[in-house]
Amino acid sequence: MREIPLSSRNLVFIDVETTGLAPCGGDAICEIGAVKINTQEKIIDKFHTLVNPRREIPSQVSLIHGIHNRDVEGAPYFEEIASSLLDFLEDSILCGYNIGFDLGFINRELEKINYPPLYLPAIDVLLMARGNLPQLPSYSLPSVARYLNIEVKNFHRALEDSLLTREVFQRIRTNLKDKGIVKIEDILSLYGLNNAFFKSFQEPKLALIRECILAKVKVKIVYLNSGGRVSTFIVTPQSIQEDKDTYLVGRTPQGEIILNVKRILEIEVF
C-alpha cells in the first residue's frame, strides 16, 4: 500500500475527557471528540462519543468537565468504538493541546483490548503556543484562545475543545506562514512529538550536514529560534551532537554556533 505524503494528509484535532490523570493507575476515557480538516483547512468530518469508563467518575472531576456517572451509564465501552475511531484517524496527522496526555489515554485503552498503539505523526498545539506566544501568564487552552480573540464555549468537553484547538492552531499557523514556515513537515519537526515520523524527515538535513562536514564547505541555514524569530546564518558545519535533540555545531564569522536540527527550516550549500 502506498504511503500518503504528509503534505496530502488530513489533520485531525482530538481531545479526550477522563476520570482522572493516570491512565496506568486505573483512570479511563469517558469522552472522545475529534474534528477532521482537509489540506484547505476546511472541516470535513467530526467524531464524538461518550465512553463508559467501567469505573466511577469522581465528583471533583465531574466539576471540571461536567460529565457525570449517569451520563455514561448507557454509553458504549471503548472496545465498541475503537474500530470506528481508528478508521476516523487513519492516514491523518493528529493535533491536540498537550496531545501527549490524549495519546497516553488512547494508547492505554488500545492496550487493554490488545490493539497496537497509534502510530501517527502528531502535533502538540501547546508547544506551538509556547513557541510563538511568549510570556503569556497562562498557556491553558482557554487563556491562549482568549489572547488570540477566539470565543471560548463549553470548555472541557471533548468535541468543543477539539474545535477550539483547531482555531488556535490555525491562528498560530497563519503567524508561522508570515515567517515563511508553510510546510506541515516543518511544523511537525518543530512541534511534533518525539517519534519516528519527524525524525525520519530530519534525516535528509543530517545527511547534507554530514557531507558538508566531510567536504569542509559552508552552508546557508534559515533557522527558527525558540522565541519564534527566523534568522539566516552562513555556517561551516563541524560536528553533530546528540542529546535530547540533535544539534549542529559549526563556525560563523562571529564564532561558534550550536543549532537544533529540528529548527532548521532550510539548508543549502553556500
Image: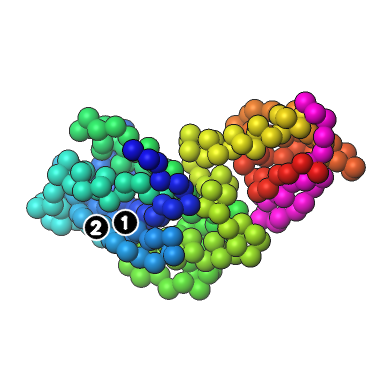
Residue 267, given in percent of the width and then of the height, sits at 71, 44
Q: Does the magenta segment cover residue 42?
A: no
Q: Residue at x 14, y 44 (%)?
A: 80
Q: Which mark is residue 262?
A: none
Q: Which mark is residue 34?
A: 1
* Residue at disc 1, secondary structure: strand
Q: Residue at x 9, y 53 (%)?
A: 74
Give the vertical position of 42 relative to 55 (above or below).
below
Disc 2 to disc 1, C-alpha distance = 6 Å
The furthest residue to the top: 214
Asked if the residues shown at circle 2 and circle 1 are in contact, with their CB atoms under 8 angstroms apart, the answer is yes
Q: Describe residue 52's horizontal placement relative to residue 66 as left or right.
A: left
Q: Residues within 10 Å of mark 1 (few under 14, many from 20)?
A: many
Residue 15, given in percent of the width and then of the height, sits at 34, 53
* 14 vs 91, nearest the viewer: 91
Q: What amino acid is labelled 2 in the image? A: His
The magenta span reads 214-234
Give the vertical position of 241 relative to 223 (above or below).
above
* Residue at disc 2, secondary structure: strand
Circle 2 residue: 48
Observer able to see residue 101: no
* 152 vs 25, nearest the viewer: 152
Q: What amino acid is labelled 1 in the image? A: Ala
Q: Residue at x 13, y 56 (%)?
A: 70
Tell me the colour scheme of the image: rainbow
Residue 160, given in percent of the width and then of the height, sits at 33, 64
Question: Between disc 2 and disc 1, whose residue precedes?
Answer: 1
Give the vertical position of 43 relative to 225 (above or below).
below
